Amino acid sequence: MNIKPFPVAVVGLGPGSQPEDPDLAYMPLPREIDSFDQPTLPTSEEVEHLHAAKQVIAELIAQLQGYQGDAEVYPVQDISQLDAANRQLINQLLGEGEVSCRVKLLDGRELDMQESVFAGIWRVLESSADGQLLADRIEACPIPAPVWQAARAFGKGELDIPTLPDQLMNAGPVLTEIAAAMQNPGSEAHIINFSLLPMSPADMDCLDAILGPGNSGVFSRGYGKCRIMATSLRNVWRVQYFNGMNSILLDTLEITRIPEVALASEDDLADSLDRLQEAWQWLQGEY
């Protein structure tokens, strides 16, 4: 959602730290809806000299004002070259939100993504296969595109169903349903709810083995403990919700580009733009 020494103030690299606990850092489902908590900011006098960081924020706001919600083309600010003081202001402003993502690209590079306290505003750290930081970006979008692009590039386009053991209950029909949904994708996600199906442990073991692991995952601690993992099949995602004891509340499979629960909404981004403008005005001494 292993800890590398990045020069940014995200907890254990935020996205990287979450999936590393013994339970794969099951993403939290909230007991209550979280409200926006404006980060504590320095005074305008304290940051008067930090022109580079303030320029980044000003440009990001300008980009967001013209952003129409495209899933692949969206506002990006590369902050790799900022010095420590300017970077610290960015860290302080953005904070750390409830959602993180991790992607391993086919060439070995890794992307660790942490949503800020502004929904839909992401900090994206790109590392080489040997752990060297290559880039540090701010991206404004429903979810950074590599989360689903890399999963599609990695995943197989067809499901070949092997001969199954006779003792299985429903694994066979479920696999047939998955294969059909992959071949005939619709505009809406095709959802298979394991929590409502009579699936035996042997059924689930069989499905896990055939679906296989993917290279992309989303880990949320916002509106509920939730873990969204790509499988080895293109556009096939395992979506699980957990309670405070890490027991599964809801276990589903979604055949879709990216499960909707992973996305920041249009309203989220509009609200984040408003909040970001307020923070900017504070830094400018306009409050």
Image (spheres, grey):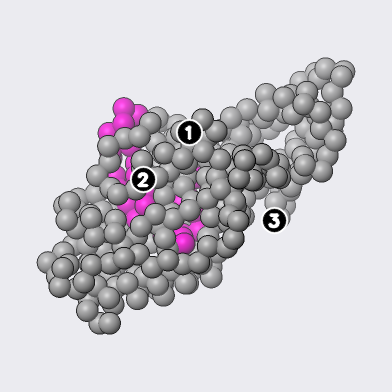
Tell me the quarter of the picture where residue 63 sits.
bottom left
Alpha carbons under labels 2 and 1: distance apart: 13 Å
Of callouts 2 and 3, the N-terminal one: 2
Q: What residue is pinned by disc 3? A: 187
Q: Percent from the top left, x then y, of residue 165? A: 83, 17
Q: Which mark is residue 21?
A: 1
Q: Percent from the top left, x then y, of residue 110? A: 39, 36
> Which amino acid does the dot numbered 2 rest on?
Val
Residue 136 inside the magenta-drawn segment? yes
Looking at this rendering, what residue extends furthest in the front direction? 245
Q: Percent from the top left, x then y, of residue 59? A: 29, 67
Q: Nearer the viewer, residue 223 or 167?
A: 223
Relative to 246, say whether 276 is above or below. below
Is residue 152 among the parts visible in the rendering?
no
Cβ–Cβ under 8 Å for marks 2 and 1:
no
Q: Secondary structure at mark 3?
A: loop
- Magenta segment boundaries in residue numbering: 119-147
> Which amino acid does the dot numbered 1 rest on?
Asp
Other residues around mark 3 within 10 Å, as few (<14) / some (14–19) / many (≥20): few
Relative to 100, say whether 62 is above or below. below
Give me the residue at 58% from left, 43% from top.
Answer: 227
Other residues around mark 2 within 10 Å, as few (<14) / some (14–19) / many (≥20): some
Q: Is residue 240 left or right of residue 10?
A: right
